[in-house]
Image: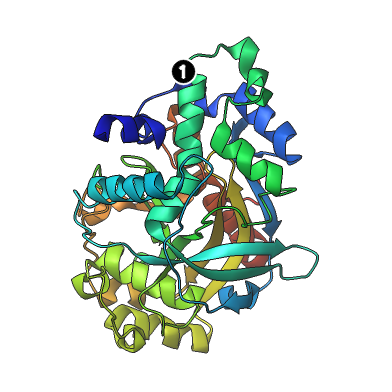
Amino acid sequence: MENALSEKTYFKYRDEVVHLIESPELINHLEKRYECKAFQLNNKIYPVTVLWKNDNEYIHPDAILGQFDKSEPHPLEKSPLFEPEEYKNARSFIKEEFEKGPIKYEGIHYSMQGIDISTNPAKINGAYCLYYDNILTQYAMEWELKKALKNLKLNTIDLLFNPDILPLREALEEKIKNPIFNGKGRSAALSISTLLVFKKDDGKFWFILHKRSSEVGVSPKMQHVVPSGMFEAKDLTAQWSIETNIWRELLEELYNKKEFQGSGKQETQENIKYKKPIKLLREMIVEGSAELCVTGICSDLLSMRPEICTIIFVKDSSFASAKKMKTNWEIETDIYDKVAKPYDLINETIEDFSTKGNIAVTAPVCIQLGRNWIAQRHGIGSKKQ
């Protein structure tokens, strides 16, 4: 049964290298499929689209949060691929596979119910969802694509429009006019990425980019910004807040604070704001020497995952020296100089990953939106490549 579930959930294709998965031909197909424009940087296009962006305004991330359905989350009972009994088995299979790593529980996450870009700032309406439902109904769409692409050639990409080639994706599209903006029909868990740019004692700015470890559940061994991760609710009493989630991820990933890395039990989050680097950052924000801002919302066209892009910009060097950074298990190295890079080399860094690949598809969006925001708001660096 395990082999059958690995095939039917598409889990067996998760780590397969399929070169067409980020090909211009596939991206063009996804643009047509969802009537959108793929993100482009340095003449390279990525299978992700920007839904809304903030070029230079100071907008608190929580300002984009709209209505929230507080109904208690329950596991989904079925999916387009599984009837109820099969779905239970599929959930058990995914649980077993994902809990082979350091995290031994299923997280509660915030899902996108809808995105309204007619307002400024845009608004995201949300609800609770469960992680393994997200894997089976959202992330699995990327693995489904990998399976289909294995048997296709460049000039046959549009065969993906044929019925029954992508049954999970097709079932969603039959119910939803445009799933980029509508999270119904799946467990549309949100994620958050943050470009952290800070000044050191030498007067220069640095930013953080890292390679994810092989133990993370999605995008293993891919480069990404820090902090980045799922928009998670530590318990049902937690505040729906992008800011709180960013502080928690920052403590987890960049300072290896184990008490914020999740236990599956209810955890008090109030003390996050009083931890040394966070308390200092919040004081700097009040004083005006640091800013926390939302820079955009994008959608990964491979998995249909919506992501919120943000920036932490710190002009005071006391932040860098306040507490030594030591990354956690989610990052391949805990050596500070390996994850912190000079901001004046950001062009070369972008050129490097544009050439070599091996970067999470939403990371270039977060980096470029943040870089443009810094250039337009603070006059640092070039606005565009």
Q: Residue under circle 1?
A: 150
Residue 342 lies, in percent from the top left, at 40, 52
Which residue is depicted at the point 47% across and 61% down?
A: 194
Residue 279 lies, in percent from the top left, at 35, 86
Residue 377 lies, in percent from the top left, at 65, 67
Q: Quadrant of the C terminus?
A: top right
Q: In this view, which residue lies farthest toward the right?
A: 118
Image quarter of residue 119? bottom right
Please name the amino acid that badge 1 sits on.
Lys
- Identify the coloring: rainbow
Q: Is residue 288 shown above or below 208?
A: below
Q: Is residue 172 shown above or below 373?
A: above
Q: Is residue 292 shown above or below 101?
A: below
Please tell me which residue lies in front, 173 or 274: 173
Please tell me which residue lies in front, 230 or 186: 186
Q: Is residue 293 shown above or below 15?
A: below
Image quarter of residue 109? bottom left
Which residue is depicted at the point 41% across and 80% down?
A: 236
State the count of labels.
1
Please tell me which residue lies in front, 267 or 51: 267
Graded by Cα atoms within 10 Å as few (under 14), some (14 to 19) or many (20 or more), the crowding at tag 1 reads some
As drawn, is 284 to the left or to the right of 40? left
As drawn, is 115 to the left or to the right of 148? right
Residue 193 lies, in percent from the top left, at 47, 58
Q: Quadrant of the N terminus?
A: top left
Q: Is residue 310 visible?
A: yes
Which residue is depicted at the point 31% across and 52% down?
A: 339
As drawn, is 17 to the left or to the right of 96? right
State the SS at label 1.
loop
